[in-house]
Amino acid sequence: MTNKTKINLLLDYLKYLKLTGIKEAYKDFIKQAENNSLSYLDFLLLNLEYEYQTKNSRKRIRMIKDSKLPIGKKFDSFDIKVFPIKIKQKIKGLQTGGFLDRKENILVFGQPGSGKTHLLCALAYEQIEQGRKMLFTTCSLLVQKLLIAKKNLELEKIFKKLSKYEGIIIDDIGYVGQNREEMEVLFTFLAERYERGSVMITSNLPFSKWEKIFKDPMTTAAAIDRLVHHSIIIEMQEVDSFRRLAAKKRLKEAG
């Protein structure tokens, strides 16, 4: 069997076994093995390790795309120094991802521009790096999708689809003025998610004003009860707006 035939056979095997990483790099690995007199075991490990890393990298890219997370909202662009020590400690504890294992919720309250969304997105990006499935959605978009599913008698189907995510960020819950039907599907989702998976919520409204969201006092109390039962609450009301700080900085530099 000629070398050309062997290479063609190798490529056929790699294609059939879907070892695309090795297929891309095998020539370099052969040269490396020849130049460094690698043992058969070392050569095999070199190939498999590269394949493993390639597959993991592609998996992370797919998971980030699937998560719908805003681009760039990671910890490397998040100024944690402006936060009080208690909030810093909570953030550090959350970065391990243990809250997902415990099915705990994260509830972040604060004024617009205080970094609520950026914080939760940064946490989600870190969890994806650990192989966990995360999802970002605004509250309004989630409610609309749930309403469509309800109309098509597919609520159970969408709940099953959402259950694959270990953590779901629901952004800006305070900005949505639901009518009764919208409130009902949002409450149904939170009840379905209760103790089955983490929700990560941002809101500019404290709990005392959540009746504006759920309209009915009993429904409001029931929703809050489910969210708070297993939760970590971060209060960011005293943190100045990042957007305001950035504007002040630009004005100072321009002056």
Image (cartoon, grey):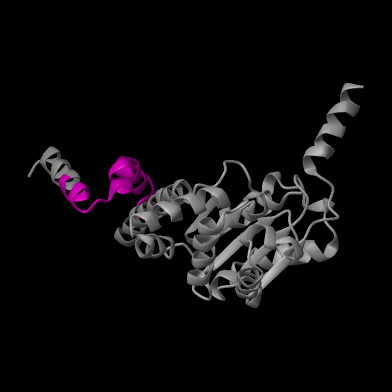
Q: Foreground: 136 or 227?
A: 227
The residue sitting at 61% across, 41% down in the picture is 72
Vertical placement of residue 36 versus 245, above or below: below
Left or right: 243 as drawn, with respect to 149:
right
- Residue at the (63%, 51%) spot, across then down: 177
* Secondary structure mostly seen in the magenta stretch: helix
Q: Does the magenta stretch include residue 219?
A: no
Q: Horizontally, is 134 left or right of 74 in the view? A: left
Kindly indicate the quadrant of the structure image that contains residue 1: top left
| Residue 33 screen position, x and y as percent | 34, 49
The percent coordinates of residue 71 (x first, y second) are 57, 41
Q: Residue placed at 63% from the left, 45% from the top?
A: 73
Residue 129 can be seen, yes or no: no
Q: Is residue 115 above or below residue 71?
A: below
Q: What stretch is highlighted in magenta?
A: 12-38
Which quadrant of the figure has residue 237? bottom right
